[in-house]
Amino acid sequence: MAGGRVTGKVAIVTGGGSGIGRAAALALAREGAKIVIADYNEAAAQAVAQEITAVDGEALGIRTDVSRAPDVEAMVRTTVERFGRVDVLFNNAAVALVGRDNRVTEIDEAVWDAVLAVNLKGTFLCCKYAIPAMTANGGGSIINNASIAALVAEPDLDAYTASKGGVLALTRSIAAGYARDGIRCNAICPGLVRTPMTAPIADETLRRFEEETLLPIGEPEDIGHLVVYLASDESRYVTGATFVIDGGYTVR
């Protein structure tokens, strides 16, 4: 969109094939950004790209396993080859192995490794390879999707909670370490949002969240609006910040 809030910017959205990632990709595209949708599910990534190109946007959908350095390096390289630069990185790809993630004494080591590989190592790898591409053009904005799990403990999700706490700490560290290179890095901590990843949550747990959240349960688009702000020059004076967007859940 000409004159949009992020017109001329190139954004990578990981986990962009569904849920919050899809909503963010569509919102960024509506505001004029060129989008690379990177997802483990290539068909889903390409479907979102087609949604964007169908309304005259520019987008590319690619398969990426963010836990693998060669995949992430290829993701950034492909973005630069196709669109010439990287301005925005939304680290959104994540897994929550509900039912297998548990208390530390009960988690299988393979489950722990799988969750941290995507949620924390994946964020690290994407930053590692995207930052040089950003600094080559004067800087950029990194937006890390953490979770209110990084702020308040939920029982029986110890691997997920640890991974998101790590994302929050990494966000602050990158903000401090790369500000002079023109890099801004901020974190979003969503509460419960209706996405395919949260679908397996038990009805009893869902009811508890609904009862304890001051506003109605969030939709992916609610997060997408915040991503656009953090991607845009409107947030030029914002870095190292944590944005809680949880309908008031953590107020209590």
Image (cartoon, rainbow, N blue to C red):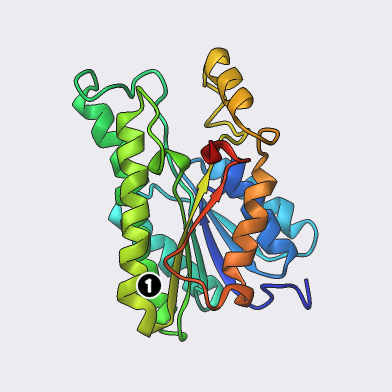
**Location of residue 249 (image quadrant):** top right
Left or right: 192, with 178 as reference point = right
- Disc 1 residue type (three-letter): Ile
Q: Estimate the x, y position of residue 97 in percent, counting from the top left.
A: 39, 27
Dot 1 alpha-carbon crowd within 10 angstroms: few under 14, some 14 to 19, many 20 or more: many
Q: Taking 43 as reference, is 76 left or right?
A: left
The image shows residue 72, relative to residue 245, as above or below, that is below
Q: Which residue is mark 1?
A: 131
When the figure is inspected, residue 99 is found, relative to residue 188, above or below; the finding is above
Tell me which residue sits at (24%, 35%) in the image: 113
Q: Quadrant of the N terminus?
A: bottom right
Q: How many marks?
A: 1
Identify which residue, 178 or 21, lies in the foreground.
Answer: 178
Residue 112 shows up from this direction: yes
Residue beneath the point at 42% across and 23% down: 98
Horizontal and vertical percent position of residue 76: 42, 66
Q: Quadrant of residue 71?
A: bottom left
* Left or right: where 63 falls relative to 171: right
Position in image of residue 167 (x %, y %): 35, 51
- Looking at the image, the residue that sits furthest to the front is 252
Residue at 39% across, 43% down: 150
